[in-house]
Image: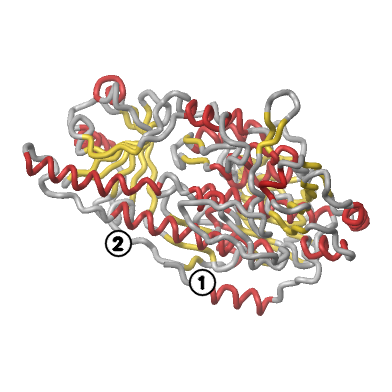
């Protein structure tokens, strides 16, 4: 790939400017790492996609100072976030899962106990709004070079880094040559980077699982009459039509007249057509309402695919390049962003010279099991939703219809876990990681419940602390960019040995003093928190060899050999 053209340099090159690629760029910028971000399109795609930014993702936004601004995107704060099920939108309501509005959710967070699980409740805002916001924010960041409208056409790696060629998408002629220390493919399910590396997906293709499986259409539509005339007093965030001859869902985007419509194709090769979308909406509404179709997209539901590997030497994969699963539960984008947070600090450590030889390999060892876990959670939810049995009499009047609707309503109310999977959101753990000290028994994994624990490997349990002016401050707001050592209570031991060991090794370490009351929550004197807010070590005393504690956490002495990595693929490869 040698040429006579000038070669530009960045520490990390990212291919793909979706939410995961942009968040990875921003997290690397947060660590002071120079980045170039390539995206084949000149702008973010203005088509509705994911709608849920879960509590863990909101914590990552908060770390970058973005959470408050992102909360202003999408639905008005007073718009109901309920999930409602109907036979037709102008007929019988079968069930309603009551959910707090944004205003109610934030009021509850402000009034919550000091040990409340999250500083940032989940947010319902469509991905297209958040992507555009992230792109505008990236334009202000000093460490990120934007190459939107440029497509990476090839790359090769060696011991010194990765060389790549980018082509201007519009002309197909202008070329740029780049050299990066590392390359990350965040370029989606059809990832060019993944395919170039020869890495495949493993798992079921979801071809037979009922609604939300197989070939699906997403349509961006405008239906002015829905909130204005049909449901003025029964608004929700998500509307599901469940009838013998109709299955569809509508998600409110702006609280007014714009919606995301999801319908299932009638055949494996059908393409979306405006007239069919209009007919589907009118069938689901039960009236000949005015419909404006703005755009379509085709996707494949019911997938439970995970990449067989997440890296190849200096090239890494993140986001949908590592996993493809149905949107049920809202786990996809959130899993990708949490993975980006894991990868970002490790790349920063490698670039800045304080990473051990096994640190970058730990990305796959930590994140692939979590991805498999989240994939399985989404698969189970999709199967439950897709295989709902709709009684033939559900639209009948009289006793028989009442009985059928009541029966179906009971089943539908059982789907609350699809929208309240706090255990999936916060419970990701790295218990088998070679860069985590194994100390104690981790809590049982439960997709619906989160059990805070200081056993190393899990996210630091959240705690509200007095700020001194009558307000409270999240413990997450006190964490440093690098590692953070929490001294819990005034009687915690001196940490000078750890501080000196970190300085000698160039490992960034912030020491934070917590008040005595924090001991009631954490029940330990010292907590060493990684840059991704997961606990790496805990103790009541500083070990004599404080350096050994730190060296394990940054990957010294735990190099992963190819044979071991291949064994991991064999053990974890089967999905479903």
Q: Is residue 417 above or below residue 323?
A: above
Location of mark 1 (residue): 573
Please count the marks in the image: 2
The kind of secondary structure element at disc 2 is: loop
Foreground residue among 12 and 342: 342
Residue 328 % position (x, y)? 40, 49
Name the side, left or right, on which 118 lies relative to 493: left
- Residue at 70% in and 65% down: 439
Q: Is residue 81 above or below residue 256?
A: below
Name the side, left or right, on which 434 lies relative to 80: right
Marks 2 and 1: in contact by CB < 8 Å? no
- Residue at 43% in and 49% down: 329
- Residue at 73% in and 29% down: 467
Q: Earlier in the sequence, mark 1 or mark 2?
A: 2
Residue 433's disc is: none
Foreground residue among 456 and 295: 456
Residue 80 % position (x, y)? 39, 28
- Residue at 75% in and 59% down: 537
Spatial separation of the CA atoms under disc 1 and disc 2 = 21 Å
Residue 208's disc is: 2
Picture colour scheme? secondary structure
Res 214 visible:
no
Quarter of the view holding residue 258: top left
For the C terminus, the quadrant is bottom left
Residue 47 % position (x, y)? 45, 37
The kind of secondary structure element at disc 1 is: loop
Residue 493 % position (x, y)? 86, 52
Res 98 visible:
yes
Quarter of the view holding residue 148: top right
């Amino acid at each position: 790939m040698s040429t006579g053209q000038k070669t530009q340099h960045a520490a990390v090159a990212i291919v793909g400017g979706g939410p995961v690629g942009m968040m990875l760029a921003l997290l690397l910028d947060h660590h002071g790492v120079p980045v170039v971000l390539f995206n084949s399109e000149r702008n973010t795609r203005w088509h509705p996609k994911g709608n849920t930014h879960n509590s863990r993702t909101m914590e990552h936004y908060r770390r970058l100072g973005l959470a408050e601004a992102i909360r202003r995107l999408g639905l008005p704060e007073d718009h109901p976030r309920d999930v409602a099920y109907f036979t037709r939108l102008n007929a019988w309501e079968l069930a309603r899962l009551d959910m707090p509005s944004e205003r109610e959710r934030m009021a509850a967070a402000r009034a919550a106990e000091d040990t409340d699980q999250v500083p940032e409740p989940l947010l319902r805002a469509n991905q297209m709004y958040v992507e555009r916001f992230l792109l505008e924010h990236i334009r202000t960041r000093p460490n990120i070079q934007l190459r939107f409208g440029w497509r990476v056409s090839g790359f090769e790696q060696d011991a010194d880094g990765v060389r790549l060629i980018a082509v201007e998408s519009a002309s197909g002629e202008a070329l740029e040559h780049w050299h990066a220390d590392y390359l990350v493919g965040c370029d989606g399910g059809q990832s060019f980077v993944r395919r170039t590396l020869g890495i495949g997906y493993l798992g079921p293709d979801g071809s037979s699982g009922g609604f939300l499986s197989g070939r699906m259409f997403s349509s961006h539509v405008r239906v002015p009459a829905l909130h204005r005339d049909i449901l003025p007093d029964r608004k929700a965030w998500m509307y599901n039509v469940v009838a013998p001859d109709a299955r569809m869902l509508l998600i409110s985007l702006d609280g007014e007249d714009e919606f995301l419509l999801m319908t299932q194709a009638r055949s494996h090769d059908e393409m979306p057509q405006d007239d069919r979308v209009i007919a589907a909406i009118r069938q689901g509404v039960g009236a000949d309402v005015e419909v404006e179709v703005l755009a379509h997209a085709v996707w494949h539901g019911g997938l439970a695919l995970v990449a067989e590997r997440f890296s190849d030497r200096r090239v890494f994969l993140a986001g949908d390049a590592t996993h493809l699963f149905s949107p049920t539960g809202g786990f996809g984008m959130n899993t990708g962003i949490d993975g980006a947070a894991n990868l970002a600090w490790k790349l920063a450590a490698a670039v800045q010279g304080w990473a051990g030889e096994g640190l970058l390999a730990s990305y796959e060892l930590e994140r692939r099991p979590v991805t498999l876990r989240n994939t399985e959670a989404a698969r189970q939810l999709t199967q439950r939703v897709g295989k709902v049995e709709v009684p033939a009499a559900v639209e009948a009047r009289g006793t028989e219809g009442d009985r059928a609707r009541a029966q179906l309503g009971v089943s539908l109310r059982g789907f609350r876990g699809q929208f309240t999977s706090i255990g999936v959101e916060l419970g990701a753990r790295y218990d088998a990681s070679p860069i985590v000290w194994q100390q104690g028994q981790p809590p049982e994994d439960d997709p619906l419940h989160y059990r805070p624990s200081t056993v190393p490997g899990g996210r630091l349990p959240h705690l509200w602390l007095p700020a001194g002016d009558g307000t409270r401050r999240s413990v997450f707001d006190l964490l440093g960019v690098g590692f953070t050592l929490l001294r819990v209570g005034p009687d915690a031991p001196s940490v000078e040995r750890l501080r000196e060991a970190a300085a000698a090794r160039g490992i960034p370490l912030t020491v934070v003093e917590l008040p005595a009351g924090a001991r009631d929550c954490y029940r330990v004197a010292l907590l060493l928190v990684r840059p991704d807010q997961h606990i790496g070590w805990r103790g009541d005393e500083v070990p004599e060899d404080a350096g050994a504690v730190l060296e394990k956490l940054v990957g010294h002495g735990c190099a992963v050999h190819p044979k071991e990595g291949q064994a991991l693929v064999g053990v974890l490869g089967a999905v479903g």
